[in-house]
Amino acid sequence: MTISSSGPSARADWYPDPRNPALLRYWDGHQWTAHTSPRPAGWGGQEWSPYSQPSRTQRVPDKGSTRTGLPAWAVVALVVFVGVATLAVIGTVLSTPEPTESAGRSSNDNSTPAASEPSDAEASTSAPSPTPTPTPTETEPPKSVVPRLTGMTRDKAEERLTTAGLQLGEVRQVFSPKAPGTVLSQSRRVGASLLAGTTVVLVVAKAYPQVPGVVGRLKAAAVERLKDAGFKVSVTTESRTSGKDGVVLRQSPSGTARAKPGSSITIVVSSVIRPVAPPQNCTPGYDPCLTPASDYDCAGGSGDGPKYTGFVRVTGYDPYDLDADGDGVACE
C-alpha cells in the first residue's frame, strides 16, 4: 500500500529514520523508501521537520491482512528483517563512527547495502595504522677549531693539536735563521672548523749548515770544498812579495759559522809578486841589501848561517826564507 504525505512534500533526500534515529532513510519526495544507512556521528544533513513530515493515510486492512495492511507472513518477515538489520547497524556504529555510505546517494539506486558489512571507506578507517618505523637521527660529526701554532716549538704545537682534537701530519723542515724546530707555518687556517681527527701539516725551522774552514788551503781545493757544502764562492786576490802563491789568506763568513745554503762565501787568495833581478852585489828581494851567500839566518836565532842578518824587509822573492809569517818583514 502507498504512504502519502499531507501538505507540502519534503524534497528527496536522506533523513533520520522515524522508527530508528540511529539510521538514515531515503525519502524520494513522495514516500519513504527501503534504503537505509547508519547515521554518522555528528551528521549535519537535513533534519526532518513537522512542516515536511509526511502523514501516513489510514488504510482499511484487506481481508486476511493485519492492521498494517500487510499479510501476516509479511509482517513476521518484516519484524525479523528489522531486528537483524538493527543489530547489524548497532554493531557497525559501535565499531566505527564513520558512515559507510554517502549521504548524497542517488534516489534511483534501489540496492540496499548490507548493514552488517562495512564499506571500503569504513574498512580503511577502522584498520589499525601501521607503526611507523623510527627514522635514525643523523648527527653531525664533531668539529674542531684549528689553533694558532706559528712561533711555537714542534712539541708544543703537537700538544696543542691533540688538545683541539686534531692530529699532527707531515712535518717539513726548511732552513731558517730562527731557532731549529720553530713552527714557521701551518697547512690549516687558524680558526677553521675541521672534522675531529683531521691532520695538520707543519713547516719548522732547520739550522743553517756550517761553513767549512778553508784558510791555508790552495785556491782550487778551497773552492771545491765550499761548493760541495752548498755554497757559492767569490774569490779575491791580495798581492804579496813573500809567502806562498795561491793560498787562501782569509774567508768570510769564517769557518764554523752558519750561512744560508746557496749564499756566497768570499775567500782572499795570495798573489806573490816576483822582484826584478837585483844588482850582482845584492841578493834580490831584500832591503837593506844582503850580499849573496849560500844561506842567511836571523841573528840571535837558532840558524846555522853561514850568514846572519837583523831586521830586513822582503820586497820580492824570499830565497833565504827569512819571512816565516809572510807579512813582508824578516827577522823582526
Image: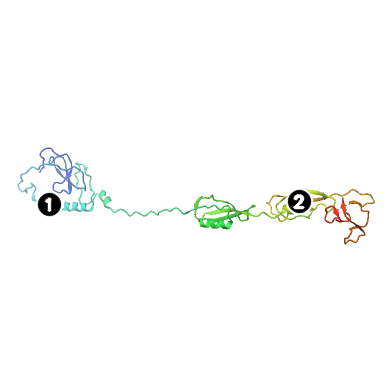
Q: Is residue 224 visible?
A: yes
Crowd rating for badge 1 (residues with CA inside 10 Å; few <14, some 14–19, many 20+): few
Q: Secondary structure at mark 1?
A: helix
Residue under pointer 1: 79
> How far separated are the C-alphas under marks 1 and 2?
135 Å
Crowd rating for badge 2 (residues with CA inside 10 Å; few <14, some 14–19, many 20+): many
Residue 267 % position (x, y) = 76, 51
Residue 239 % position (x, y) = 82, 49
The amino acid sitting under disc 1 is Val
Residue 100 % position (x, y) = 23, 48
Q: Secondary structure at mark 2?
A: strand
**Mark seen at residue 129:** none
Q: Is residue 103 left or right of residue 250?
A: left
Q: Are marks 1 and 2 in contact (CB under 8 Å)?
A: no
Residue under pointer 2: 267
The tag earlier along the polypeptide, 1 or 2, is 1
Q: Which quadrant does the N terminus fall into?
A: top left
Q: Nearer the viewer, mark 1 or mark 2?
A: 2
Q: In which quadrant of the rendered view does residue 28 lie?
A: top left
Residue 39 % position (x, y) = 19, 48
Looking at the picture, tell me which residue is in the foreground, 173 or 86.
Answer: 173
The amino acid sitting under disc 2 is Ile
**Furthest residue to the right?**
281
Looking at the picture, tell me which residue is in the foreground, 261 or 7.
Answer: 261
Q: Is residue 23 left or right of residue 292?
A: left
Q: Is residue 230 left or right of residue 198?
A: right
Looking at the picture, tell me which residue is in the foreground, 107 or 11.
Answer: 11
